[in-house]
Amino acid sequence: MIFGKGFNYGIDFTGGAVIQVKFNQATDPGDLRKWLSAQDVNFSVIQQIGIPTENEFQLKIQGDVQDLAKLSANVSAAIEKSTGPGKFEVRKTDVVGPQAGAELRWASFWATIYAVIGIVLYVIIRFDVRYSPGALLSLLHDSVLMLGAIVLTQKEFSIQIVAAVLTIIGYSINDTIIVYDRIREVIKANPTKSLKDNVNESINTTLSRTINTNTTVLLSVFALWLFGGQVIRDFSESMLVGMIVGTYSSIFVAAPIFIFMAKRQERLQLAHRTA
């Protein structure tokens, strides 16, 4: 994310146009790319939407606002020159200006920040300061790995990705709170046992619930990826990555950080009593 190419921002955040085209006959996406390229129409993404027999495509095109205003006519002219008149229709054209895209980018950023702040405040109120660093770092871990995978594969960063990140943040903290709740209960029930033993027991007693729940959700997300089509493919792929990292972070990130913070607090209290 820092040293690579960075995010491949989509039209939602940079400005551009989305044009929906439906053909009357079977059309291959590769042919559509050739037709547009031959007429110097610069497109970023061509997605087939719906079932293949509907022959409907979505074109995402980046450009200046002045060019976007006449883009639909340019696309129609480019396709008509290759296929002939009356064999397609432009069903919808949506234009996003660069200023609106920049505003949406910042709005998405702050939405994520506010979500994380709200979750951390909730954890502090419900538990105590020993638990909140683990919850925060667990959320940071999940978000960074998820976004890092998007940067690595250079997938288009769109509103769908923001929705996936916010969904995973909420899902991950749910798992973390369940583990933390059990840790607190076990520590109260077994005050003489070591902290590590209590945490291990807590994780083991919640493990079957974690595996069953996450497997069910993973199957649902996998079904979205397999049958949802190209339009929500980026969302479902991001969710798959987020589900995997969010599942193990509750156990291997949040719990060990709690142990570290609890032992640190014990040392500070001991030093204070000694002084």
Image (cartoon, rainbow, N blue to C red):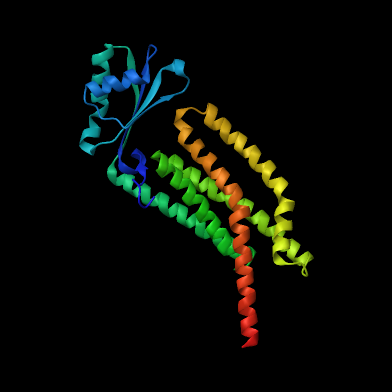
Is residue 171 visible to us here? no
To which quarter of the image does residue 219 belong?
Answer: top right
Can you give x and y, in whole percent of width and height, for residue 251 in the image? 63, 53
Residue 262 position in % (x across, y down): 64, 69
Spot occupied by residue 120 in the image (x, y as percentages of width and height) = 55, 61
- Quarter of the image where one finds residue 62: top left
Q: How many numbered marks are there?
A: 0
Looking at the picture, how far across and down is residue 35, in whole percent? 27, 19
Quarter of the image holding residue 127? bottom right
Q: Say if 126 sits above or below 42 in the image.
A: below
In the image: residue 223, left or right of residue 143: right
Pick whichever, 180 or 17, lies toward us. 180
- Of all residues, the one furthest to the bottom in this rendering is 275
Above or below, comparing residue 157 to residue 45 in the picture: below
Viewer-side residue, 101 vs 5 = 5
Q: Which residue is drawn at the image coordinates 37% and 17% (left, top)?
A: 28
- The residue that appears at 45% across and 42% down in the rendered structure is 161
Is residue 101 in view?
A: yes
- Residue 166 position (above or below residue 156): below
**Of residues 161 and 65, the one drawn nearer to the viewer in this rendering:** 161
Q: Quadrant of the C terminus?
A: bottom right
Q: Residue at x 39, y 50 (%)?
A: 1
- Horizontal side, residue 220 vs residue 34: left or right: right
Compared across the picture, whether 106 is left or right of 121 comes to left
